Amino acid sequence: MAGRKPAAKEEQETQPQAQQKMINTSAPMPWWGKVILGAAGVYLISTKTPILEILNLFFYVVMIPIGLMVSIGLISTGSLQAFSQNWGNMMNDVKSKIETRAQEIVSDSENKKAA
């Protein structure tokens, strides 16, 4: 068993060397090869795939739910804003009425004491 471990280490050391040899020996693709490969890809995608169906599916799967969420968000934001503004206005009205009534009560009691 002790003899097997060095053999495994040797295999691990030789694998990266073999991979590096493969990487180093491969030549990069020339520019004209990239252009031809890209043009062939565009041609195949545009002629052999159903672009309009894919766009239609994207619209139904992505855009409709996003539009629905935006609409619900606008409804909730508008409702919250209307409720908070009306509530604030109502609280200010009640506060002013209470203050005026309190001043009337205080002035009436001062007038009674003076008389």
Image (cartoon, helix red, strand yellow):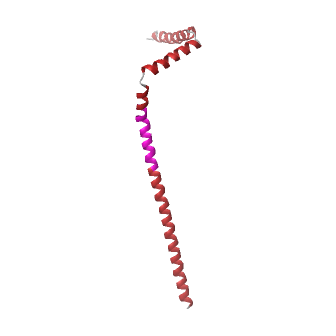
Query: Would you say the magenta stretch is mainly helix, strand or loop?
Result: helix
Place of residue 4 in the rendered image (x, y in percent of width and height, measured from the top left): 45, 10
Number of numbered discs on residues: 0
Residue closest to the far bottom:
115
* 48 vs 58: above or below: above
* 71 vs 43: above or below: below
Q: Quadrant of the C terminus?
A: bottom right
Q: Is residue 5 magenta?
A: no
**Along the line of sight, the residue nearer the viewer: 102 or 89:** 89
Q: Residue at x 51, y 67 (%)?
A: 92
Q: Residue at x 46, y 49 (%)?
A: 74
Q: Is residue 46 left or right of residue 26?
A: left
Q: Quadrant of the N terminus?
A: top left
**Along the line of sight, the residue nearer the viewer: 73 or 12:** 73
Q: Residue at x 42, y 40 (%)?
A: 65
**Along the line of sight, the residue nearer the viewer: 105 or 92:** 92
Q: Residue at x 42, y 43 (%)?
A: 68
Q: Is residue 67 magenta?
A: yes
* 47 vs 20: above or below: below
Place of residue 79 in the rendered image (x, y in percent of width and height, measured from the top left): 45, 55
Place of residue 47 in the rendered image (x, y in percent of width and height, measured from the top left): 44, 20
Residue closest to the far right:
31
Q: Quadrant of residue 103?
A: bottom right
Residue span colored magenta? 57-74
